[in-house]
Image: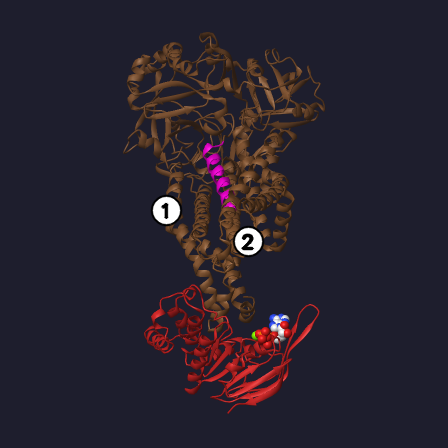
């Protein structure tokens, strides 16, 4: 599904040039559950953002389902993104002014799903995430675990082929964290490809494969199954 | 402590340079406009106050109703001033002025046409404060053929002010001896003359006639005199003096004159009110209208308000960003009053900087503004006596009032909530801010509608079909100087190629000539069936040369000998007389003196001319009667040419062949017409200027707010983009909230503006309609301007990289 070769990303501030990704290559197949690990600042988030088509690489190639993304226009990438990808963040990134229901509904609005269908799909996914009883609450009124469930609901409501999760359990206690990992595992078992950045060896063990980064390069790959 | 307030205030500016700039600039712009208007308004209000006795000086006005006509004069009778002095002990002094219109004065070999001359009684200098630098103020204007000059006129003719005893030659035959030199009249005088000629030079000034009004009469009352009582006694006084004449002229007693619904009254207007509140027939110069003072004061106030609102809005919008600072300060032990002082210092400092900028800009722009407003305002050392307190007052008032809300609002934040991040709601619960935006835009939209209506009305006045054609009419203003040869001049001019026609008379729709006479429907001269029209002596080319149209009947003709007793009336006169078929009807006019039937003259109506405008378009067209008369006041020449210069040269050549020594004086009818409306055109320009300013300031504020909104919502925008929102979707989302407010402002402001402008238009006899599209244009313009302002920020926000905005959280 994903094949990157010699991917490069630099950040230029006034004086220093940081090499966030240094000729990184990897391949991820459909249906895989991959964990990306590494010390802080090694480029995990940068990689995830590029994979999520939120950011441009400075060099190398990125093939998504056989198409070269590196040269896509912003518009084409946005279109690809909203139909194929779902995001889960460490800090949930829910919109405070919208209710749980409205937050989850948002991606469907942007893909122009008719209102009636939106209602049934949002309700179904909220049911699945066991957060239905909170549908009319605002994010501020939920616990961290509940918020992350809403965020996952929002990530999957469009039935994406790939979910990108950046430290999804980083702000949660271990019990809530385990719940989130169970949810991701379920999704993966139903066929969704998952790429997850994590600092936790425990969480990483839910995945099929761990890719370890250091200074923007792969140093190690553990195949778990 | 103060130092700490100031340093942290300065740091806060430095860290928010963009917003500080918007804040200071907006406020400075508002203050500049405010100051300029204050200058304008205070200049308007200061008219005639240079007179040390201004409080005790009144002008005597005359109101007359006779038959169907009502006339309001600024002028009164020749013997009035003297009689008032004799009859009323409370009258300390009285003075008459009479416009002398125009004269040619010799300076060496050249003659100069002067237009600012007046006859005046010697008491002029005892009533008005016109300091004399040469000569004796008491005796200066006693003798016939003496003149008092203003300083600059003396210099113009003699290069000196020590000119007592020198003479000036007027119109080639009259010598006037200079008996005094006064300071130039202040611009803020309702009359403005360069030459004051002794009243005794004027035969008419000695006439004891109470039914002729040609003199502006001013009285100076004694200290403590009861004005009401004096004014009340004026009508009895008038009856005493004019009763005999009324009896003789009108064949009725004064009381039966009044009983039949007529009146003949005197009243007073305080000197200080003349400039703003008097618009009568026979004013000594064009006056202004108090209405504009009100309107401009309101605009000044609103502009300042808009600027202050900006300031408050931006400050509270920033509150979210500053909430954290407040929280930290509070945790560190800062008291609430310290924080309030801190924020107020900041706000006063901003106001101070803006005020310095504004005062500088206002002084710098004053010459330009003078040009635009037609004034001669200047700031002198003396002005600082009121400017300085105004400055300090404004800074404190605006600084505190605009800073108060954010100061109290911010300082009331609970530190725990803020630090927990629960108060990142800076932009959200913003009812007040929304209200203020609506308020600002309501004012802006109101001003746009107001300006459009005023502009349309002024344009209408300019282009209205006046009933005559003022284009391509050259007026020789001094044809009367040709005396008997004026007719010859006319004939020669008519023969020139490019000249279509010419008419010889001083009575023109654009001139100041007025003459009224009484006409009666019955030979018995029954005043109930009478008309008191403008009665103009014209020649047989008048109607054609001025491009007037006959409604019925015919124009005067050279070939009809009976036309000497024929008259042409206008439609309005026909209406006043209630004549359905006016043609060939007869009107009677007294020959003066004995009112017997043999002493009346009968006129038959040979034509009705379509109404044409001859006074302000604010007034309805009054009745006019035209009769054939040899009047050589001016020659109006209708030309049709592409080479106006050539025709003008030929006209001048013709003039020279008849009168080689007297220079010709020409004007153009359309320019004369425009001059009548110059002050109104100026007002229109000022309106556009201030409206533009008000809208710019409001937009500056909106720009700042939009920037804040975008900044505050940057995380949300990032999330939405990641979830698939496109740029247009984001732009729409950010703009709609503001545009809703603007729409609300339109809904509020339009009916209000419509109503007030409707009221304003009622003052004009000839006025435009306020069409719905004026309001539509104003609304769309406001929306468009607001949208452009906002979309700059929205597009910027929508294009930003979502990863970046999420990182900064
Ligand atoms: N916008 C940016 N400007 C400059 N440097 C950046 C920027 N974003 C990331 N970097 C740098 O690029 C490198 C990789 O950053 P990245 O966020 O990918 O690390 P990370 O592995 O996700 O770390 P963490 O585990 O702490 O989240 C770091 O050295 C970081 O300082
Ligand atoms: Mg990271």
What is the image's colouring?
by chain
User: In this view of the protein, can residue A74 be seen by the observer?
Assistant: yes
Q: Magenta span has B137?
A: no
Colour chosen for chain A: red
Q: Name the chief secondary structure element in magenta.
A: helix
Q: For this view, does A125 lie left or right of residue B170?
A: left
Q: Assign a secondary structure to mark 1.
A: helix
Q: Quadrant of residue A112?
A: bottom left
Colour chosen for chain B: brown
Q: Say above or below: B666 vs B161.
A: below
Q: Chain of mark 2?
A: B
What quarter of the picture does the N terminus of chain B occupy?
A: top right
Report x, y in % for residue B472. Answer: 52, 42
> Mark 1 or 2 closer to N-term?
2
How many dots with numbers? 2
Query: Which residue was labeled with disc 1?
Result: B751
Residue at (51, 63) in percent of width and height: B794
Nearest the viewer among B70 and A12 is A12
Report x, y in % for residue B144. Answer: 59, 12
Q: Assign a secondary structure to mark 2.
A: helix
Q: Residues within 10 Å of mark 2 (few under 14, many from 20)?
A: some
**What number is the disc on residue B331?**
2
Q: Chain of mark 1?
A: B
The answer to whether the beta carbon of the residue marked 1 is less than 8 Å from any atom of ligand 1 is no
Q: Say above or below: B341 vs B283.
A: below
Report x, y in % for residue B236. Answer: 37, 12
Q: Residues within 10 Å of mark 1 (few under 14, many from 20)?
A: few
Q: Quadrant of residue B621?
A: top left
Magenta segment: B288-308
């Amino acid at each position: 599904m994903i094949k990157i070769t010699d991917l490069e990303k630099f950040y230029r501030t006034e004086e220093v040039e940081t090499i966030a990704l240094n000729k990184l290559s990897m391949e991820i197949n459909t249906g895989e559950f991959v964990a990306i690990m590494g010390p802080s600042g090694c480029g995990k988030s940068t990689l995830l953002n590029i994979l999520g088509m939120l950011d441009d690489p400075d060099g190398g190639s990125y093939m998504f389902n056989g198409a070269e993304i590196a040269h896509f226009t912003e518009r084409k990438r946005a279109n690809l993104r909203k139909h194929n990808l779902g995001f889960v963040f460490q800090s949930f990134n829910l919109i405070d002014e919208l209710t749980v229901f409205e937050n989850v509904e948002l991606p469907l609005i942007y893909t122009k799903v008719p209102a009636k269908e939106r209602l049934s799909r949002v309700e179904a996914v909220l049911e699945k995430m066991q957060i239905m009883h909170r549908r009319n609450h605002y994010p501020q009124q939920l616990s961290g675990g509940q918020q992350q469930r809403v965020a996952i609901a929002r990530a999957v409501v469009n039935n994406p082929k790939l979910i990108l999760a950046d430290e999804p359990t980083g702000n949660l206690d271990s019990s809530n964290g385990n719940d989130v990992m169970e949810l991701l595992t379920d999704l993966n078992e139903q066929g969704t490809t998952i790429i997850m950045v994590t600092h936790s060896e425990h969480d990483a063990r839910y995945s099929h494969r761990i890719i370890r980064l250091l200074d923007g390069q792969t140093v190690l790959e553990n195949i778990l199954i | 402590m103060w130092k700490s307030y100031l340093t942290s205030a300065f740091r806060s500016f430095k860290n928010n340079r963009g917003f500080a700039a918007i804040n200071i600039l907006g406020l400075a712009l508002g203050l500049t406009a405010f100051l300029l208007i204050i200058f304008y308004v205070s200049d308007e209000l200061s008219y005639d106050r240079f007179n040390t006795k201004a409080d005790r000086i009144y002008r005597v006005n005359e109101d007359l109703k006779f038959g169907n006509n009502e006339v309001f004069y600024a002028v009164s009778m020749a013997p009035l001033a003297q009689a008032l002095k004799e009859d009323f002990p409370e009258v300390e002094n009285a003075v008459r002025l009479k416009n002398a219109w125009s004269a040619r004065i010799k300076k060496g070999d050249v003659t100069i046409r002067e237009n600012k001359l007046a006859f005046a009684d010697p008491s002029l200098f005892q009533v008005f404060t016109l300091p004399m630098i040469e000569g004796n103020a008491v005796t200066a204007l006693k003798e016939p053929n003496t003149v008092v000059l203003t300083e600059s006129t003396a210099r113009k003719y003699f290069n000196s002010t020590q000119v007592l005893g020198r003479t000036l030659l007027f119109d080639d035959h009259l010598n006037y001896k200079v008996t005094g030199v006064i300071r130039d009249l202040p611009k803020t005088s309702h009359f403005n003359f360069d030459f004051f000629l002794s009243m005794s030079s004027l035969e008419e000034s000695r006439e004891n006639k109470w039914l002729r009004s040609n003199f502006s009469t001013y009285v100076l009352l004694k200290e403590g005199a009861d004005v009401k009582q004096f004014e009340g006694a004026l009508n009895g006084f008038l009856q005493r003096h004019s009763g005999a004449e009324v009896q003789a002229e009108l064949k009725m007693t004064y009381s039966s004159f009044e009983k039949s619904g007529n009146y003949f009254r005197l009243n007073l207007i305080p000197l200080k009110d003349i400039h703003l509140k008097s618009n009568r027939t026979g004013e000594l110069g064009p006056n202004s209208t108090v209405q504009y003072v009100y309107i401009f004061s309101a605009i000044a106030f609103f502009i300042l308000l808009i600027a202050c609102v900006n300031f408050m809005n931006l400050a509270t919008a920033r509150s979210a960003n500053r909430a954290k600072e407040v929280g930290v300060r509070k945790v560190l032990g800062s008291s609430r009053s310290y924080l309030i002082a801190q924020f107020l210092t900041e706000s006063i400092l901003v106001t101070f900087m803006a005020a310095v900028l504004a005062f500088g800009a206002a002084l710098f722009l004053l010459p330009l503004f003078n040009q635009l407003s037609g004034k001669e305002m200047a700031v002198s050392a003396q002005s600082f006596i009121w400017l300085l307190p105004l400055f300090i007052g404004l800074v404190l008032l605006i600084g505190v009032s605009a800073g108060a809300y954010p100061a109290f609002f911010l300082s009331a934040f609970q530190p725990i909530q803020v630090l927990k991040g629960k108060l990142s709601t800076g932009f959200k619960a913003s009812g007040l801010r929304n209200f203020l935006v609506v308020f600002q835009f309501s004012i802006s939209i109101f001003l746009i509608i107001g300006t459009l209506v005023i502009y349309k009305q002024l344009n209408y006045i300019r282009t209205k079909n006046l009933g005559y054609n003022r284009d391509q009419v050259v007026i020789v203003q001094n044809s009367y100087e040709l005396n008997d040869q004026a007719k010859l001049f006319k004939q020669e001019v008519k023969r020139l190629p490019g000249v279509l026609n010419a008419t010889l008379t001083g009575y023109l729709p654009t001139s100041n000539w007025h003459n009224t006479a009484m006409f009666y429907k019955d030979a018995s001269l029954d005043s109930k069936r009478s008309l008191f029209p403008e009665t103009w002596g014209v020649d047989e080319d008048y109607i054609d040369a001025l491009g007037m149209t006959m409604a019925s009947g015919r124009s005067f003709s050279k070939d009809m000998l009976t036309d000497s007793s024929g008259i042409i009336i206008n439609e309005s006169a026909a209406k006043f007389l209630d004549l359905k078929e006016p043609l060939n009807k007869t009107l009677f006019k007294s020959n003066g003196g004995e009112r017997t039937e043999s002493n009346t003259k009968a006129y038959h109506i040979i034509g009705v001319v379509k109404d044409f405008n001859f006074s302000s378009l604010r007034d309805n067209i009054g009745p006019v009667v035209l009769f054939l008369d040899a009047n050589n006041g001016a020659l109006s020449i209708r030309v049709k040419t592409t080479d106006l210069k050539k025709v003008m040269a030929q006209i001048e050549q013709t003039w020279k062949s008849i009168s080689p020594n007297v220079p010709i004086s020409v004007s153009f009818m359309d320019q004369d017409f425009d001059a009548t409306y110059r002050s109104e055109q100026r007002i229109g320009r000022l309106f556009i200027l201030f409206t533009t300013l008000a809208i710019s300031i409001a937009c500056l504020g909106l720009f700042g707010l939009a920037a804040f909104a975008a900044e505050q919502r940057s995380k949300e925008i990032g999330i939405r983009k990641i979830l698939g929102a496109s740029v247009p979707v984001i732009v729409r989302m950010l703009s709609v909230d503001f545009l809703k407010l603007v729409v609300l402002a339109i809904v509020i402001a339009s009916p209000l503006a419509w109503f007030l402008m409707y009221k304003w238009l009622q003052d004009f006899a000839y006025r435009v309609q306020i069409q719905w599209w004026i309001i539509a244009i104003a609304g769309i313009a406001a929306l468009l301007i607001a949208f452009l302002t906002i979309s700059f920020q929205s597009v910027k926000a929508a294009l930003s990289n979502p990863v970046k905005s999420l990182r900064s959280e």
